[in-house]
Amino acid sequence: MMDFAFLMDTIKQLLAALPTTLGLFSASIALGGLMAMGLTWMRFSRIRVLVQFSKAYVFVFRGTPLLIQLFLIYYGVSQFKIVQQGFMWPLLRDPYYCAVITLALCTAGYSTEIFRGGVLAVPVQQLEAGRSLGLSGFMLFRRVIAPIALRQALPAYSTEIVLMMKATSLASLVTVWEITGVAQRIIAHTYRTMEVFLCATLIYLVLNFLIVRMIALLEHRLSPHLRPVKVPANLRIRTQ
């Protein structure tokens, strides 16, 4: 028989860690998105060094496990004296900021390829039309490339966002007390693994459902040309 009092108390404790999870998620997505934009720009640059750097970055962070990246940044980087004496040390000695940096670096690698695919999906005819109108490089990007690339990349990018929400659970391995970390601490005291992880699963499901719905609304707003046209009732053809 289910112990509803225990379940409610567990959910209450897990929800107390929700701000930490949301902080990890939002900070890593924002920072990683900005980095991905810069790396995408490098990929289309005419400067060979920048192109090769972008390719190497994507190869490294997509080709290695996120868990190893987290351990290298939290445990490995701190061993170097130059890091301990540098301006980044106040951040790198804090497990929370180490988790944010790692998540951001990882998602930037995946997002770069997603954004690159969105840019490549922009029809050449629309680029030529923009140039024929005399648009500058910046205006061409703002008016033509960015809106189309965003619409094309959004479905794949939504998957990456959901994966990053789930990836925040790894922060518990470096003593960041987000939802999964608090769940593990409750299990260590109660030995009730099933109930605690079921509560954590429910919270993650709700969070990802809200994320998916918000992205679906954004995609709907950015794609007015794909919406079905509503024909007025007086213009509809009557069939026998």
Image: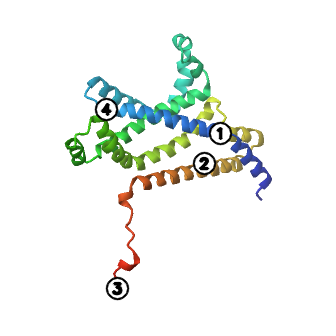
According to the picture, the residue beneath numbered tag 4 turns out to be: 43
According to the picture, the residue beneath numbered tag 1 turns out to be: 19
* 131 vs 240: above or below: above
| Residue lying at 52% horizontally and 54% vertically, measured from the top left | 213
Kind of element beneath mark 4: helix
Nearest to N terminus: mark 4 or mark 1: 1
Q: Nearer the viewer, mark 3 or mark 2?
A: 3
Labels 3 and 2 touching (C-beta < 8 A):
no
Nearest to N terminus: mark 2 or mark 1: 1
Nearest to N terminus: mark 4 or mark 2: 4
Q: Amino acid at mark 1?
A: Pro
Q: How many marks?
A: 4
Which quadrant does the C terminus fall into? bottom left
| Residue lying at 51% horizontally and 51% vertically, measured from the top left | 214
Residue 87 can be seen in this image: yes
Q: Amino acid at mark 2?
A: Tyr
Kind of element beneath mark 2: helix
According to the picture, the residue beneath numbered tag 2 turns out to be: 204
Q: Is residue 165 left or right of residue 234?
A: right
* 185 vs 101: above or below: below
Nearest to N terminus: mark 4 or mark 3: 4
Residue 3 can be seen in this image: no
| Residue lying at 39% horizontally and 62% vertically, measured from the top left | 227
Q: Nearer the viewer, mark 4 or mark 2?
A: 4
Determine the image quadrant of residue 157: top left
Kind of element beneath mark 3: loop
Q: Position of residue 123 (x, y in %)?
A: 25, 48
